[in-house]
Amino acid sequence: MRDAYSVQTVRAAERELMARLPAGTLMRRAAAGLAAACAGMLGRVYGTRIVLLVGSGDNGGDALFAGAYLARRGAGVTAVLLSPEKVHAGGLAALRAAGGRAVASPAARTVLEGAPADVPALVRRADLVVDGIVGIGGRGGLRPDAVEITDAVEAAGVPVVAVDLPSGVDADTGEVRGVAVRAAATVTFGAYKPGLLVDPAREHAGALRLVDIGLGPYLEAAEPVVRAAQHADVAALLPRPSAESDKYRRGVVGVAAGSARYPGA
């Protein structure tokens, strides 16, 4: 069973856990899991090209630290910073120390290394794009400057890994109000968020991978807001045939569908 918890519940659990750990521990756990998932999608890391789409805040920090892990394994990692003045400083320093580089997005006010990034050219050469634009606190669709970048990624046909959830979707409701990233896979941390299991946002998430960062004990008393049955859960409900089974012992299938007015179902 996949249990999803509200953003408020997840953040409360994170605060409790962070109070007991050295600063930055949770982000590094999340980034290590994200890097491992990216490596799994690539098959090999050395010699590949990875583009990070980095917004402000911790979501961008997760992407930057993951990029640092991948750069140390021989990947060519370039971070496109949508808000260079608000970038996670520790993550950016880690990426640069590992041999990665950072460039400003075309719409950014700050120029970091040379001219603003030629995003279409970058993503056309990339093997993987990491979406770290907006985290679970985002509301509404992507801003126009982000849309320009994600349009270039979609046009290039490069697989996208979303950090925690696809940017532009609502983590709590699963709504998509405007443009949102369409990911091949989403790596989420600590717990599933409802938007990863509820349409239409679910269609943007791709394959899901949950990274355990230690929130389990802090969620035990919380009530999930969404529970999604998996194949194993459904299989466990079905009667198992034995040597003596016949059609009368296997149960009866009933279908309740349609109505007097709409019998076609």
Image: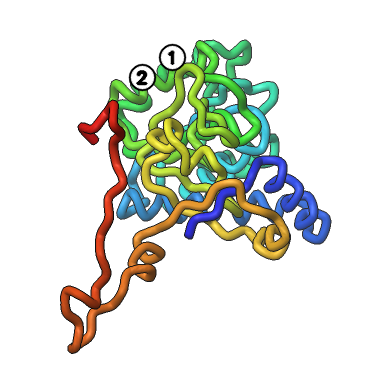
- Residue 64 to residue 54: above or below: below
Answer whether residue 212 is visible to the viewer in this image: yes
Q: Position of residue 51 (x, y in %)?
A: 43, 33
| Type of amino acid at the residue the image marks with label 2 | Ala
Residue at the extreme front of the image, as rendered: 260
Mark 2 and mark 1 in contact? Answer it, CB < 8 Å. yes
* Secondary structure of the residue carrying numbered label 1: helix
Front-lying residue, 37 or 51: 37
Apparent side of residue 222 relative to residue 75 in the rendered image (left or right): right
Q: Residues within 10 Å of mark 2 (few under 14, many from 20)?
A: some
Residue 152, label in figure:
2
**Residue at position x 43%, y 49% in the image:** 208
* Residue assigned mark 1: 148
Quadrant housing residue 261:
top left
- Residue at x-position 33% and y-position 46%: 47
Measuring from the top left, give residue 17's x and y in whole percent: 76, 57
Q: Kindly state the secondary structure of the residue where label 2 is placed.
A: helix
Residue 129 makes an appearance in the image: no
Q: Residues within 10 Å of mark 1 (few under 14, many from 20)?
A: some
Query: Where 211 sits versus 94, above or below?
Result: below
The residue under the point 43% across, 53% down is 37
> In the depicted view, which residue is nearer to us: 253 or 213?
253
